[in-house]
Image: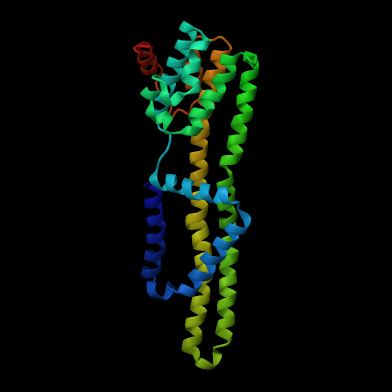
């Protein structure tokens, strides 16, 4: 919602200021300029970006427009889930975790936390981290390196849409110049039509430059920044999982492992220590 409000502010301030100076919004409406600039920008994106990244841009843009972020309550639930899983492993042995990790969708523990089940990437990261612990195929002090490598790979992958949008944002001012040059060429061919016709075509050409800069710095680059911020929030969620699982693998108590993960979070989303501890102690692990 905030991103829509911000876009309305940008648009309103631009048109409002133009009108206050005596301008008429109608003189900015030149469909040919929109076709040239937005068409070239779309073509550049298709040329420079793989299909899967384009689909990811669409997905992440929808998420950004919806204003969905990882909130404090989400981390609270995640830490509770981690504690329950660790307590099962501590009380019943690591092998007792196998039924939950191998098929989390059917797990009675995971089913109590539907928010995690709705995010396959987080669920997969957690299960992939626990599987080597259950199998005993890796030393506890090596698990963190393994999960860190996976985390870095996911971080690089999640930034591909950001880089693509930034590339389009950086290109739009130059694309606006292309539209302006095309407009000037069109103007030069219409000099014989008189000053009024020439002035109208020059205005259209200048609108092309305006549109390119306006779209770049008013919408595309801010959208890339918002997606990057959302990516950082998602990465923090995965890092929280990594810290907890790595601590548990090293033999730390479930409560200590969860506390380490809690302290790794930003203060804006970090659950309170006392509230979390009270919630964890009230859990009945099945």
Is residue 88 rendered to the left or right of residue 163?
Answer: left
Q: Which one is in front, 280 or 181? A: 280
Q: Residue at x 52, y 11 (%)?
A: 95
Q: Which one is in front, 10 or 181? A: 181
Residue 40: tell me if it is visible. Answer: yes
Is residue 280 rendered to the left or right of residue 203?
Answer: left
Q: Which one is in front, 58 or 218? A: 58
Where does residue 266 sit, x and y in percent of width and height? 48, 29
Where does residue 209 sit, x and y in percent of width and height? 54, 69
Is residue 17 depicted above or below 86 in this figure?
A: below
User: In the rendered image, which quarter is residue 248 located in?
Assistant: top right
Residue 24: tell me if it is visible. Answer: no
Q: Residue at x 48, y 57 (%)?
A: 218
Is residue 161 depicted above or below 137 in this figure?
A: below
Q: Considering the image in quadrants, where does the C terminus appear?
A: top left
Q: Which one is in front, 68 or 270? A: 68
Is residue 51 depicted above or below 235 in this figure?
A: below
Where does residue 155 sit, x and y in percent of width and height? 58, 36
Where does residue 190 sit, x and y in percent of width and height? 54, 88
Is residue 76 depicted above or below 49 in this figure?
A: above
Q: Residue at x 37, y 64 (%)?
A: 16
Most extreme residue toward the top, as rendered? 91
């Amino acid at each position: 919602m905030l991103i829509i409000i911000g876009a309305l502010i940008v648009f309103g301030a631009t048109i409002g200021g133009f009108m206050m100076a005596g301008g008429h919004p109608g003189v900015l409406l030149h469909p040919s300029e929109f076709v040239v600039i937005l068409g070239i920008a779309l073509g550049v994106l298709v040329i420079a970006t793989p299909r899967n990244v384009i689909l990811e841009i669409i997905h992440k843009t929808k998420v950004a427009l919806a204003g969905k972020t990882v909130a404090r309550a989400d981390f609270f639930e995640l830490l509770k889930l981690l504690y329950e899983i660790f307590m099962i492993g501590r009380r019943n042995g690591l092998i007792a975790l196998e039924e939950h990790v191998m098929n989390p969708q059917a797990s009675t523990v995971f089913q109590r936390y539907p928010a995690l089940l709705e995010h396959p990437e987080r669920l997969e990261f957690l299960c992939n981290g626990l599987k080597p612990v259950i199998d005993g195929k890796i030393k506890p002090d090596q698990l963190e390196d393994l999960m860190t490598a996976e985390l870095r790979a996911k971080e690089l992958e999640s930034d591909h849409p950001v880089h693509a949008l930034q590339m389009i944002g950086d290109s739009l001012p130059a694309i606006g110049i292309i539209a302006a040059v095309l407009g000037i060429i069109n103007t030069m061919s219409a000099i014989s039509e008189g000053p009024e016709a020439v002035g109208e075509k020059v205005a259209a050409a200048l609108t092309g430059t305006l549109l390119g800069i306006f779209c770049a710095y008013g919408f595309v680059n801010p959208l890339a920044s918002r997606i990057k911020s959302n990516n950082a929030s998602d990465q923090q969620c995965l890092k929280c999982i990594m810290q907890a699982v790595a601590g548990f693998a090293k033999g730390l108590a479930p409560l200590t492992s969860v506390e380490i993960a809690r302290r790794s979070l930003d203060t804006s989303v970090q659950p309170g220590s006392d509230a979390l501890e009270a919630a964890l102690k009230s859990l009945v692990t099945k």
